[in-house]
Amino acid sequence: MKRIGIADTTFARVDMASAAVRSLGATGTGYRLYRRTVPGIKDLPSACQALFREEGVELALALGMPGKAEYDKTCAHEASLGLQQVSLLERRPILECFVFESEAGSEKQLARLATRRAEEHAENAWNLLFRPRALARRAGTGLRQGFADAGPARPVS
């Protein structure tokens, strides 16, 4: 039985973890979930490290939604660096799933984007653990999480 960790925040304006949990359930079985909810995005690295060390998860999803202010973007960058450091130290993958409020034009679009991105990252997490070749077959296809896929680049002749 594989162990998947989900770290999310109370600062996010959408319950991205619930979307990820639903998506994992629809994608497949063979795993057990462990969740850590923390106040803000800068707390995600320590939450993921705790999931690795205390719960023995093999992979973590880090779900966060930085605010609109420039300071929030800086915090997201710092959190991202922390997540990369934890991933390297623990030798386990962390799938970072951040949704910036500036990515959507309306509240409805923001909620849809956050939900869909969390769902698609959860699917990627399951595939990474159970079907890594499925991801390899999709390399270079221009997949986008939360938005329409871009498709592969076509050479200009």
Image (cartoon, grey):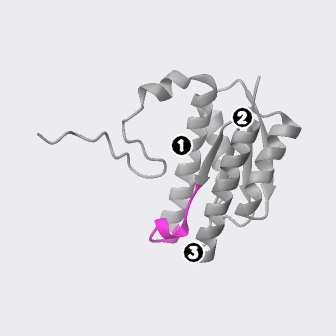
Residue 131, horizontal then vertical, whole percent: 56, 23
Picture residue at 69% right of the left edge, 50% below the top: 83
- Callouts 1 and 2 close, C-beta under 8 Å: no
Residue position for label 2: 91
**Sequence order check, earlier mark of 3 and 2:** 3
State the extent of the magenta-drawn residues as a range.
Answer: 98-107
Q: Secondary structure at mark 3?
A: loop
The 10 Å Cα crowd at callout 2, few under 14, some 14 to 19, many 20 or more, is few
Which of pointers 3 and 1 indicates the residue nearer the eye? 3
Say left or right for 123 vs 64: left
Q: Secondary structure at mark 2?
A: loop
Picture residue at 80% right of the left edge, 45% below the top: 49
Which of pointers 3 and 2 indicates the residue nearer the eye? 2
Which quadrant of the structure image shows residue 94? top right
- Callouts 3 and 2 close, C-beta under 8 Å: no
**Amino acid carrying mark 3 in the image:** Lys
Q: Secondary structure at mark 1?
A: helix
The 10 Å Cα crowd at callout 1, few under 14, some 14 to 19, many 20 or more, is some
Residue 74, horizontal then vertical, whole percent: 61, 69
Residue 153 lies in the magenta-colored region = no
Q: Quadrant of the N terminus?
A: top right
Q: Is residue 65 visible in this depiction of the protein?
A: no
**Sequence order check, earlier mark of 1 and 2:** 2
Residue 93, horizontal then vertical, whole percent: 66, 37
Say left or right for 111 vs 61: left
- Callouts 3 and 1 close, C-beta under 8 Å: no
Q: Which mark is residue 120?
A: 1
- Rounded to the nearest angstrom, the CA distance separating label 3 from label 2 is 32 Å
**Amino acid carrying mark 1 in the image:** Glu
Say left or right for 108 vs 50: left
Picture residue at 62% right of the left edge, 23% below the top: 130
Q: Which mark is residue 68?
A: 3
